[in-house]
Each structure stands twice: as C-alpha cells, then as structure tokens.
Amino acid sequence: MTKPFWETKKLSEMTPKEWESLCDGCGRCCLYILHNEETGDVFETDVACKLFDAKKRRCTDYDNRLKRVPDCVQLTPDNISTLHWMPKSCAYRRLSEGRGLARWHPLITGDPKSVERAKIAVSPDLIPEDEIDDTLLESRITKAR
C-alpha cells in the first residue's frame, strides 16, 4: 500500500492541488488574530475577514483575496514555519513541524464534517470585520492560541 502524498512529499514538492487539499476548512486562519508584542501571546477573536462566509467556512473570493484584503497572508511552503499565529491544529503548520495530519483531518477521515465534530471549526456566529470598530477587537477575544 502506498503512503499518502502528505507523508512522502515535502510541502515544497506538493502540486497546487495537493497543497490546497491540506486545508481542513476550519476557518481559523480567517479570524482576526491579536498579538501581544510584549509577551508574544496570540489571541483569537470572533471577528472574521469581510470575505469569509462563516456558515460555509470558505472565502467568498478566494482567487482575488490578496488584492481585496491587503493583510491577507498567502500560505506558502516558504512562510508557514514563520507564521506562529496559525492554529496548532492547522495541517500546514503540523506538517511543517513534522507532526503529520490530525486524525480528524478530512484527508484522513474522508469526511469534510470531521473538522466540525472534532470542534476545530470556527463558529458560524462570527462578526464580519466591516461590522465592528477596530477599537473593540480586544473585547472580542475568544481564546488564546
């Protein structure tokens, strides 16, 4: 039996289709993240990018997101190891750290809803960024990463 691509290839060797399939669809990278510069602590909020559809947990304009959202970060094999704000559950982060995919990942289970059952997915009750004042972001912290 052959091993799956994520066990045999480096991130930099993956095809675009393989790379994209690593996304588990949790939506946590589309939340507003706050960083405490003094302590290095990272906090999630319940505020999402204006392009994020919280019910589908997908970007509504994925192909143009980098043009439409200036602070959107495109994950690449070259930058993933430096993006410490990414959730520890993220497949890209896990693989870059040599940890392998989580047992609930849709590539393992064959079921896209496994991320919800594992309670990794974001809530569908998020606030779009264009509906909240930036000065209120600290009051919207939901958890530390």
Image (tube, rainbow, N blue to C red):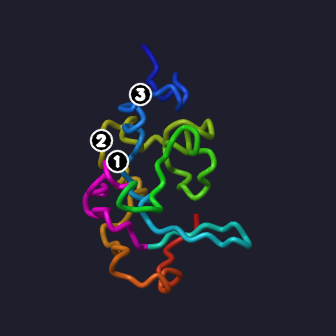
Residue 106 numbered mark, or none: none
Image location (x, y in percent) of residue 1: 42, 13
* Label 3 – label 2 distance at C-alpha: 22 Å
Image location (x, y in percent) of residue 4: 44, 24
Residue 111 numbered mark, or none: 2
Amino acid bearing label 1: Ser
- Crowding near the residue tagged with mark 2, few <14, some 14–19, many ≥20 C-alpha atoms within 10 Å: few
Q: Is residue 47 magenta?
A: yes
Amino acid bearing label 3: Thr
Asked if 143 appears above or below 23 in the picture, the reply is below
- List the residue tagged with mark 1: 114
- Say which of marks 1 and 3 sits in front: 3
Image location (x, y in percent) of residue 123: 35, 67
* Label 1 – label 3 distance at C-alpha: 24 Å
Say which quadrant the C terminus sits in: bottom right
Along the line of sight, the residue nearer the viewer: 112 or 32: 32
Would you say 49 lies left or right of 88 here?
left
Are circles 2 and 1 on residues that touch, CB within 8 Å?
A: yes
- Say which of marks 3 and 2 sits in front: 3
Q: Residue shown at 55%/45% (left/top)?
A: 93
The single residue placed furthest to the right in the displayed view is 38
- Crowding near the residue tagged with mark 1, few <14, some 14–19, many ≥20 C-alpha atoms within 10 Å: many
Asked if 30 appears above or below 13 in the picture, the reply is below
Image location (x, y in percent) of residue 21: 37, 37
Along the line of sight, the residue nearer the viewer: 65 or 33: 65
- List the residue tagged with mark 3: 15
* Label 2 – label 1 distance at C-alpha: 6 Å
Magenta-tinted stretch = 46-65
Q: Is residue 92 magenta?
A: no
Local SS, label 2: loop
Amino acid bearing label 2: Asp
